[in-house]
Amino acid sequence: MLFHTTVKKIIHQKGKEYHIWLEENPFHPEGGGQPGDSGEIRSRRFRGKVKDCEKDGNSKFLTVFIQEGSPETGEKVEVFLDDARNLVLSRSHTAQHLFSRVLEDHFEGLMTTKVNIHDHASTVYFNFDGDLTLRDMFDAEERVNHLIRMALEVKVLGYEYDTARSIDGLKAKWDLLSPEEPVKVVRIGDMDLNACAGTHVNRTDEIGGFIVLALKGRKPSWEVKYSLERQRICVEHSRILREFSNTTGLSATEILKTFRNLKVENQNLSSNIKNLIPFVSIPWNISSAGAYQLYYSNPESLPLEIVNQLSRRKIEEDPNSLVLAMVTGNERNLFNFVLRKGEKVELDLPALMDSMPELNVRGGGKGSFFSGITNIGSFPKWVDLISSRIKK
Ligand SMILES: [Zn+2]
């Protein structure tokens, strides 16, 4: 939509961002979790993108990113409202009314606390002192889609504050409303009645489709992410699932169960390995490094996690020593290593590693522990270098 008006005042400017107050402003301001309208603005002297519309007391101003020239007070301007984007916001916001209503009706005590409306996916925040599952959200999603298909009329009426307060069943945040201003009341069919300053569609079927993407949180604070791109997301997700099912030979219904079983198996395996560590020993080579002993070993067939535990045990046995363990890494010609020092060793390992650039080490650690990757898998080189640095 195109409008003609005049720049009333430039209230703020920082670089290319201007806050512009217009004589007449057709943009809907940001509020209640819904972002302000966006679009474009131009005159003979300048051209810019309208990023947002914000409210300041009773007036509203545009946040404009200038692309060319600069605006001036009093000049005539053309403003374009991005109707397509604003319609998406209105659809998403109206869907949130339905979703909140469905959940509030179904879960006693559930309350919507905050919303964040965006073009592609929006989020609703709830307070509910009970458990919610994704299955519950799927049920609510179905009811919302049913209400959408019913093509319920969405009516917006303005009431005097006192009259609004007497409307039976009207949901409102009265502490945020001014008694001096009229209250905008939004009625959807005969199922939802809300005091709301956002923008809405005229009939629920204009929303299109509703799909829940995620449920997060724990009682009493919950958040649900949803989108209106139901068709696209359903197809995309179904493709991923079919590909997964085809590759693994698992039916779609078996996947989650199998994944959970594998997770349990994996945890059991990890704890079994941990239990085995006290019974595992590896051969250590010994060399002297200054006043200390240097133990080193490369137990090739053991996983790094176990080697790490064994090196820790060794250093506890002999606090007057250094321990170096190395295993072949996942990539060819790379080795994973762990270097530790005992309690009685007065050295800073990161500083020691820094003094040996010849080892091409990538990694990190604290004073008594250092781990990382190297392409130098030759122990004689490590041992010689460490000994010579410590003797200094
Ligand atoms: Zn609303």
Image (tube, rainbow, N blue to C red):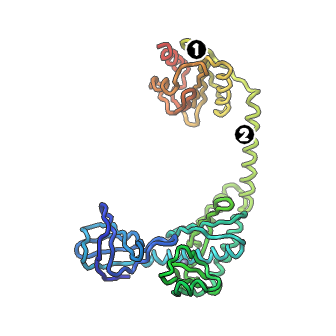
Q: Secondary structure at mark 2?
A: helix
Mark 1 residue type: Tyr
Name above or below for residue 315 compared with residue 149: above
Where is residue 317? Give x, y as percent: 68, 20
Along the polypeptide, which appears first: circle 1 or circle 2?
2
Name above or below for residue 256 compared with residue 274: below
Residue 16 placement: quadrant? bottom left
Residue of label 2: 270
Q: Secondary structure at mark 1?
A: strand
Residue 194 placement: quadrant? bottom right
Mark 2 residue type: Ser
Residue found at x 48% / y 25%: 351
Please give the label number shown on residue 292.
1
Q: Nearer the viewer, residue 52 or 2?
A: 52
Where is residue 197? Give x, y as percent: 50, 78
How far apart marks 1 and 2 lie (CA) works out to 34 Å
Where is residue 161? Give x, y as percent: 53, 83
Where is residue 127? Give x, y as percent: 65, 66
Note whether residue 185 is visible: yes
Task: Tell me: 266 left or right of 232.
Answer: right
Residue 101 placement: quadrant? bottom right
Name above or below for residue 174 compared with residue 284: below
Q: Is mark 1 within 8 Å of ligand 1?
A: no
Report the image quarter containing ligand 1: bottom right
Of tags 1 and 2, the one toward the viewer is 1
